Amino acid sequence: MANVYVSELRDHVGETVTVRGWLYHKRSSGKLWFLVLRDGTGLVQCVLFKGNVTAELFGQADALTQESSLIVTGKVRKDERAPGGHELDVAELAVVQIAQEYPITPKEHGTAFLMEHRHLWLRSSRQHAILKIRHEIIKACRDFFDSKGFTLVDTPIFTPAACEGTTTLFETQYFDQKAYLTQSGQLYNEATAAAFGKSYCFGPTFRAEKSKTRRHLMEFWMVEPEVCFAELPDIMQLAEDMLIFILDRVLEKRREELKVVEREVAKLERVGRPFPRISYDEALRLLQEKGSSIEWGGDFGAADETTLSETYHRPVMVHRYPTSVKAFYMQPDPIRPEVALCVDVLAPEGYGEIIGGGQRIHEESLLRQRISQHGLPEEAFRWYADLRKYGTTPHGGFGMGIERAVAWICGIEHVRETIPFPRMLYRIYP
Amino acid sequence: MANVYVSELRDHVGETVTVRGWLYHKRSSGKLWFLVLRDGTGLVQCVLFKGNVTAELFGQADALTQESSLIVTGKVRKDERAPGGHELDVAELAVVQIAQEYPITPKEHGTAFLMEHRHLWLRSSRQHAILKIRHEIIKACRDFFDSKGFTLVDTPIFTPAACEGTTTLFETQYFDQKAYLTQSGQLYNEATAAAFGKSYCFGPTFRAEKSKTRRHLMEFWMVEPEVCFAELPDIMQLAEDMLIFILDRVLEKRREELKVVEREVAKLERVGRPFPRISYDEALRLLQEKGSSIEWGGDFGAADETTLSETYHRPVMVHRYPTSVKAFYMQPDPIRPEVALCVDVLAPEGYGEIIGGGQRIHEESLLRQRISQHGLPEEAFRWYADLRKYGTTPHGGFGMGIERAVAWICGIEHVRETIPFPRMLYRIYP
């Protein structure tokens, strides 16, 4: 008998097929057993009718526990009322394993317990849906950049120097020297963009920050495009285009999963172009009007970001932050060098920053000055300065943290549910 | 004027457009300057005719050095003889920067010099072509698994325990505990496959091996699918299907780049189904006939692998190695428990192993026995053992090292050219 996945049942109505999966739940009504099976691609209700199977087989159903692994053969019937939309009239049932008492039950569990059982928690419908949406977001990012002619480059994880300060770096012994785990592929991407015109990297990045907030992980994935001959407005446009592409894709392909996570889809649907673009100065005025005590020159705190991101129904692009609060490589505004040609994109509904980027310094002498001002080791940045010697161009890009984007799009509170095995302060198990 | 990329010129023949890029080389014939520009997507010959431009502009061309950054506006003309197939009749030329003397010239450079200038070496046509093929291979892997209903899961980089021994692990201080950089996402994928039916991860992996061979990097990317209810023949079929899919895609999309790297394309074209599947025992006989001194029970050395992989014109699948030379989680053959239900796929032309995989132990007591025999910390594997308690099923998968696959498909000698910034023994710069 053909093995099929539940997601393929719609193509097999009226046929007898075999489905392999795990018992999700069961109920009986005397002459019938309703076994709901999950196989990772969907749910199907398997109906055991006493009159159709041997007494032994019918009796087996009684012993089945949640998550027992089963191989079920039966005829596919369309049934709108059944969970998943199809039923299987069971002819044969083979039990691979009767599962031990499953620790995750429909009753409430605390987060610590669930995180400790993350390897099993992933099977729950909500976690399953979130990670399906994550998959779709990642695929959308890649499809977006691939379709626009960007070249994928995998930038290194081991780096000899810190991009944005050393206090938040994970360190390792790399044979006879020290190496640090990357915080961003950007610097390397500036080299690859000069080779490919436009490039992107997409990989894990690391921050050893002792912060225990709903928006921080020690290990998180980031997609980072970089474009030569691009200036700040181009970078903002690219970010807007990418986010619209991602939202369209998720709304097109993952309606079911958005329903499972109880996302208010209308709030995603109303996100349209153009995204508001406001300067840091304008944002500051807005915050001060709303009672924030922030002064010019300060970076926005989490509360400020939340306020800004609740003001609009779309992602808001805040550009031209004070140079002093931003990284060493940021291109100053030629008209007003105390602000940088940078942009943060804040997701709406209070989600806050999901993207940071801007134009990079492309003039060698200014770059050297900044490296020295920031006390960075010149030798480690020799290759980076080289890029300004051999055909430098205005260029820029951004980085989007995948877990924060997933949290926003799924409408969930904490990033820990947006990655299969989150790495948080003091947690690297499982 | 519209900014276009060289790869888009074919859609703009007869139009006046602007191209931005870097001077690749130039030559003059009195009244003409031929400036070949690269913009990362291709090459275009820009023709400056003395009669068409100002004397000042014409004179500028003389000062242009290799890799100078330029913005060129002109009319697009189709010309089969020109490098890239198009010419631009230059009307305007803006010099962004006259590059300093470029260190990489058409003359020969030693590998150490090129590796030291990897950030610039990437701009050379051969390196550019290799990384374009790498991009295509990675995209093909993802498209293959996505189209087959696999869910992408990003398995963690920080792990508390070693999968295959601790001697080759990079270690880091993770707040109050030790963490190791992952060598494989497989164990985690066994959990996600039980949640999604079939899943794959694709990320960087790390081996702190003090080996300096043409096939080793400290940091390399691996794609790893895992499938529930799958047995060894299914895994071998999946590997064959994936490799055929990748080859077809590269042959379809990257002919130009294969030409640049001087790949003998016929050798890729003759790779068809089915791949030979031979047992370790058969492979051993073959090696002994060819004069190898290897005895039953020994793992194949690099020379043995080369011999095997030169015997066939297709990838060869060697299955059922002695259990003793393989990892703790390998399912023993029920008929002959001294061999494991595993497979290595060796690429032809002497390239050797590119894939390793097989069936995993799905019975809890046997797994516990192996964990203990291998002296592994039971506590760290508690969650892994859990997977055998709650609806265990036969399952398996494989891992393919991207850099080795790229080396084979490009026909290049050393994996160091298959990744933008290779991490080798003692080298983490640039």
Image (spheres, coloured by chain):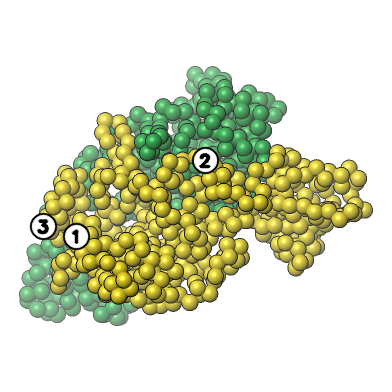
Chain colours: A green, B yellow
User: Residue A397: x and y, percent?
Assistant: 58, 42
Quick check: B67 left or right of B383? Answer: right
| Residue at (33, 73) in percent of width and height | B290
Query: Is there a contact, CB below 8 Å, between mark 2 and mark 3?
Result: no
Residue A85 appears left or right of A402: left
- What residue did someone put label 3 on? B365
Q: Chain of mark 1?
A: B
Q: Earlier in the sequence, mark 2 or mark 3?
A: 3
Front residue of this view, candidates B57 and A77: B57
Tell me which numbered mark, 3 or 1, is placed earlier along the sequence.
Answer: 1
- Give the residue pinned by disc 1: B324
Residue A56 in view (yes/no): yes
Residue that label 2 marks = B430
Q: What's the residue type where badge 2 is placed?
A: Pro
Q: Residue at x 57, y 62 (%)?
A: B261
N-terminal label among 1 and 2: 1
SS at circle 1: helix
- Check chain identity for marks 1 and 2: say if they share one: yes
The local secondary structure at tag 2 comes to: loop
Image quarter of residue A7: bottom left
Give the spatial CA distance, label 1 vs label 2: 40 Å
Indicate left or right for B278 with B65 as reference.
Answer: left
State whether discs 2 and 3 lie on one chain.
Answer: yes
